[in-house]
Image: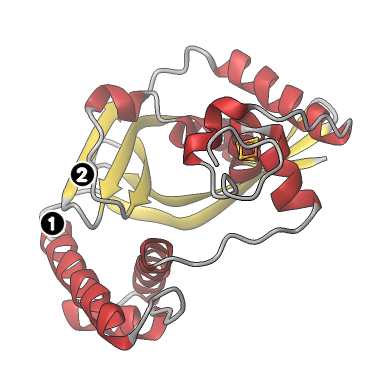
Amino acid sequence: MEISFTRYRVYRECPWKYKLLFVDGRRIPMTPKSSFGLSLHRALEAWLRGGELSLESLREALNACWLTSGYPDEEAEARWHAKAERALSRFYGEEQSRRARTVAVEKEFIWTSGAHQVRGMIDRIDQGPDGAYELIDYKTGPSVPSVEEVAQDAQLRFYALGAKRALSLSPETLTVDCVAAGARVSAPYDGAGEEALDADIRAAASGVEAAAFAPDTRFCPRCDFKKDCVYSAAK
Ligand code: SF4
């Protein structure tokens, strides 16, 4: 069984949602928010990989990576595109003052935990002038987490474990870069709890393997399937 962060997260939200998505193949339609977020992620990856780190090339990357699906009409799409341009211009300005260098973009890791393979893709890894590694995750929503929330961010902690186990890289800092909100929040990485996380990832993978898909209705109010799921407690 191979488990990624997304599969692990969904299984922990609700095993039945995991079944709908990854066994039955249900799809979640694109929305302006998800389309915008994916476009920004792809543009940043293309820009950092491209090597020419000018504002002009960042704009070109955005246009090349822009997804047109998910918007109700062209007017709405143009508004979101303008918002993406503003966000990336601000991001570019902040990048100019960074002293760290980027050592990896969309870095994949795979490691073995018990009988399972754990896979992930880290948005970006930077290395500071002192040699310390920083794992960066881009978020494209409007909210900005607190330092404490970043320190406990499930995705970054999953990636930190993967970086250590698969890449022999010990991160010292976790960072959420809120590209659209224009804020970058960092927290020191504390490895306490890694064994528990490892065990929980294994348990989730074993649950999937055993087809243990009991619904967990605590997540229903935030679920994409709440309108038509037979078990939904939030119809
Ligand atoms: S609506 Fe509720 S029970 Fe159904 S998949 Fe979503 S979270 Fe699970």
Please determine whether, in this image, residue 114 is positioned above or below residue 159: above
Can you tell which mark lies on residue 184? 2
Can you tell which mark lies on residue 207? none
Q: Is residue 186 left or right of residue 8?
A: left
The image quadrant where one finds the C terminus is top right
The image quadrant where one finds the N terminus is top right
Q: Residue furthest front?
A: 235
Q: Is mark 1 within 8 Å of ligand 1?
A: no
Describe the colour scheme in one phrase: secondary structure
Q: Is mark 2 within 8 Å of ligand 1?
A: no
Residue at (58% x, 36% y) in the render: 9
- Write down the quadrant of residue 4 in the picture: top right
Can you tell which mark lies on residue 94? 1
Please determine whether, in this image, residue 65 is positioned above or below residue 29: below
Q: Nearer the viewer, residue 216 or 88?
A: 216
Instruction: Give the mark nearer the N terminus: 2 vs 1.
Output: 1
Provide residue 22's location: percent of width, then percent of height. 74, 51
**Circles 2 and 1 in contact, beta carbons < 8 Å:** yes
Residue at (67% x, 27% y) in the render: 201
Residue 169 seen by the camera: no
